[in-house]
């Protein structure tokens, strides 16, 4: 009601997820390659469209005359109470769309008490992001380096900087086939962008005989074209960063695959929860549980990796139909987080009713960042939470426990 009454247009110009995309595109019209990197998906974008479309297969059935005056989205993840089930999914290279980059989104998440999952491919170091996140909850997403000494160094820094959970992304050993980016020859890392966390790492830098560069923006703009120009003009700092970018890509998205057995190394070297991101099948979810992982993110990377893949919400439905997974969730031993396609409060309700304990927001907060920096990202997060809370009230539910796994009661499958 406050929003209607304020008569102030939103910072972002709209709270409509589709319009947000259009406004962000307009904002980036001078460097559409950056916008397309965020917006784009693998191949024909078929998986991304399937992610969105599958939400339509489940429809919400509202109930009337139930007292839902007092409502709460409160939830418990890995033994910690949060005011909502929302997390910000890890997104790299945020500096390509806004100079405040991850500092802005981490601060926005912190103000909303939403866990910020910092990407390994951030344009700021984990020390700087921790500072921006302040007392806010934060987790660290690992693109698993080839070398154990670099992995251990990253884990040590993450621990020292208050990142409590480790999210290990399994679906990006090879970057997906993304025609939008191939057409424009745009891959931020190859322009030395998205490696600030790497250049802040003493072990990675020692390999090249360099000191770590802590808490600093790179000595060049994040715009690929400008980097290329400076490179061709022989700017030594830029050259150094571009070469480091290539080496980092070869470490963290090397094309070499790790196996289930290798996860032991992370479990042994990380004290908090280890969460495997990119799981899409019951077999892999159960395997994750069997090897002692504390949770999974059911995700297809927003359709950016495998074109023509199953919709992520369909995968969630299958995984949460496993009695073994459900029992582990109920005992508090295992946490299922969902992302890929979440845009509205109703999407969040559907995912929780199908069995997710938390949901990850991806591209929408990046559009907020693109349009209006920290204020834009915060507005997107707050409006998502507002939408979800209102929707919960409108269907006669007071708490998430009245929604969680209530598929039969709340949802209707529709063809
Ligand atoms: C991502 N995602 C991602 N995931 C990850 O584990 N590490 C990363 O660095 C990134 N980087 C990244 C960049 C961009 C531009 C996008 C759009 C996505 C995937 C992300 O965490 C999440 O799974 C998807 O964004 C969810 O899909 P939607 O909701 O954005 O469609």
Image (spheres, helix red, strand yellow):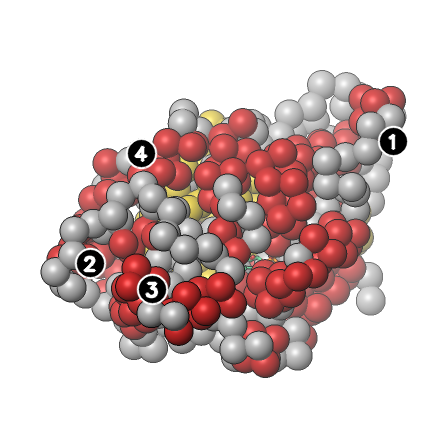
Q: Do the residues labelled 3 and 4 touch (CB within 8 Å)?
A: no
Is disc 2 placed on a helix, strand or loop? helix
Residue holding disc 2: 204
Q: Earlier in the sequence, mark 3 or mark 2?
A: 2
Above or below, comparing residue 58 to residue 392 in the picture: below
Spot occupied by residue 159 in the image (x, y as percentages of width and height): 25, 39
Q: Of callouts 4 and 1, which one flags the residue occurring earlier in the amino acid sequence?
A: 1
Q: Position of residue 156 (x, y in %)?
A: 20, 44
Alpha-carbon span between mark 3 and mark 4: 36 Å
Query: Which residue matches tag 3?
Result: 235
Mark 4 vs mark 1: in front: 4
**Which one is in front, 308 or 375?**
375
User: Could you tell me how far apart the alpha carbons at marks 1 and 3 are, in whole angstroms?
Assistant: 66 Å
Which residue corresponds to the image point at 75% horizontal and 52% vertical from the top-left? Answer: 23
Q: Where is residue 58 in the image (x, y as percent from the top left)?
A: 76, 56
In the orientation shown, which residue stands out farthest toward the top? 70
What residue is pinned by disc 4?
A: 162
Q: Which of marks 1 and 3 is nearer the N terminus?
A: 1
- Judged left or right of residue 346, residue 290 is left
Q: Residues within 10 Å of mark 1 (few under 14, many from 20)?
A: few
Q: What element does badge 4 sit on?
A: loop
Vertical relation: 177 (above or below) 240: below
**Reading the chain from its start, which is encountered first: label 2 or label 4?**
4
Q: How far apart are marks 4 and 1 (CA)?
A: 44 Å
Q: Which residue is at the front of the view, 33 or 51?
A: 33
**Which residue is labeled 1 in the image?**
64
Q: Distance between the residues labelled 2 and 4?
A: 21 Å
Q: Residue at the spot x=37%, y=52% of the render?
A: 218
């Amino acid at each position: 009601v406050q929003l209607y009454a304020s008569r102030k247009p939103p910072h972002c110009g709209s709270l409509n997820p589709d319009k947000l995309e259009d406004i962000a595109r307009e904002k980036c019209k001078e460097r559409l390659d950056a916008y397309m990197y965020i917006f784009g998906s693998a191949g024909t974008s078929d998986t991304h469209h399937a992610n969105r479309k599958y939400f339509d297969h489940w429809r919400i059935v509202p109930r009337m005359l139930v007292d839902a005056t007092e409502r709460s989205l409160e939830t418990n993840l890995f033994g910690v109470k949060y005011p909502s089930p929302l997390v910000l999914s890890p997104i790299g290279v945020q500096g390509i769309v806004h100079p405040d980059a991850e500092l802005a989104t981490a601060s926005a998440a912190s103000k909303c008490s939403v866990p910020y999952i910092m990407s390994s491919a951030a344009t700021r170091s984990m020390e700087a992001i921790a500072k921006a996140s302040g007392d806010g909850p934060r987790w660290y997403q690992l693109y698993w380096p080839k070398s154990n000494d670099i992995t251990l160094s990253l884990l040590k820094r993450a621990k020292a900087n208050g990142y409590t959970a480790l999210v290990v992304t399994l679906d990006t050993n090879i970057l997906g086939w993304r025609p939008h980016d191939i057409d424009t020859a745009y891959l931020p890392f190859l322009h030395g962008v998205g490696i600030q966390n790497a250049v802040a790492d003493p072990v990675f830098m020692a390999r090249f005989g360099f000191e770590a560069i802590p808490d600093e923006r790179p000595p060049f703009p994040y715009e690929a074209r400008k980097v290329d120009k400076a490179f061709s003009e022989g700017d030594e700092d830029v050259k150094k960063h571009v070469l480091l970018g290539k080496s980092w890509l070869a470490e963290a998205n090397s094309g070499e695959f790790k196996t289930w057995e290798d996860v032991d190394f992370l479990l042994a070297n990380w004290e908090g929860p280890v969460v495997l991101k990119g799981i899409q099948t019951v077999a892999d979810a159960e395997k994750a549980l069997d090897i002692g992982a504390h949770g999974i993110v059911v995700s297809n990377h927003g359709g950016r990796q495998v074109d023509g893949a199953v919709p992520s919400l369909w995968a969630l439905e299958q995984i949460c139909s496993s009695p073994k997974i459900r029992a582990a969730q109920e005992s508090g031993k295992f946490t299922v987080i969902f992302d890929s396609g979440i845009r509205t409060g109703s999407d969040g309700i559907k995912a929780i009713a199908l069995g997710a304990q938390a949901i990850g927001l991806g591209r929408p907060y990046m559009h907020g960042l693109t349009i209006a920096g920290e204020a834009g990202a915060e507005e997107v997060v707050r409006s998502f939470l507002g939408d979800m809370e209102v929707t919960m009230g409108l269907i006669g539910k007071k708490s998430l426990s009245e929604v969680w796994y209530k598929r039969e009661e709340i949802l209707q499958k529709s063809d």
